[in-house]
Image (cartoon, rainbow, N blue to C red):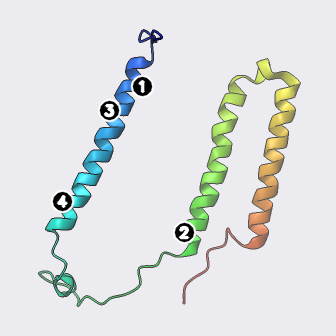
Amino acid sequence: MEHMDFAHPYFGAFIMFIITFTAFFATTMLSRFIGGKLARKDTEKLKCTLYECGPEVTKQPNTISVQFYLMALLFILFDVEIIFMFPWAVDFVVLGWFGFIEMILFLLLLTIGFIYAWKKGALEWHSIK
């Protein structure tokens, strides 16, 4: 039988990761099971009634405009650009010309993406009528 090396510096962290993942999974499954057993399934009428005051509740499809999703996606895309530019700016002298050319190519690709989104009308807000 081989000797296992338990003296590795990350062995304790790995064991804690396994324990945490197991506890999270068990807690999630237990709460889903208990919630499913204790929940009343015949209260749909109660959910649609008035609560203290306010307008009558009507069932409507809960839709989110695609424009919100598109704006969020574009924000994340161009926000990541700034995240990649900070380390480049810090090590600009160390990277030299190679780093400068790489950043120019990166900015060129992002500019092409920005122009494409602009031409497609992704940056224009359309009113819902």
The residue beneath circle 2 is 68
Which residue occupies the foreground of this view, 16 or 126?
16
Confirm or deny contact between disc 2 and disc 1 (CB under 8 A): no
Confirm or deny contact between disc 4 and disc 1 (CB under 8 A): no
Amino acid found under the numbered disc labelled 1: Phe
Q: Earlier in the sequence, mark 2 or mark 1?
A: 1
In the depicted structure, whether residue 66 falls above or below residue 77: below
Position in image of residue 93 (x %, y %): 78, 19
Question: Splitting the image into 4 quarters, where does residue 20 fall?
Answer: top left
Question: Splitting the image into 4 quarters, where does residue 107 fall?
Answer: top right
Position in image of residue 83 (x %, y %): 63, 39
Which residue occupies the foreground of this view, 66 or 10?
10
Task: Give the Cα separation between the discs numbered 4 and 3.
Answer: 22 Å
Which residue is at a point 61% across and 56% down the rendered structure image? 75
Amino acid found under the numbered disc labelled 2: Phe
| Of marks 2 and 4, the one in the foreground | 4
The residue beneath circle 1 is 14
Q: Is residue 95 left or right of residue 6?
A: right
In the depicted structure, whether residue 64 falls above or below residue 89: below
The residue beneath circle 3 is 19
Task: Give the Cα separation between the discs numbered 2 and 4.
Answer: 36 Å
Amino acid found under the numbered disc labelled 4: Ile
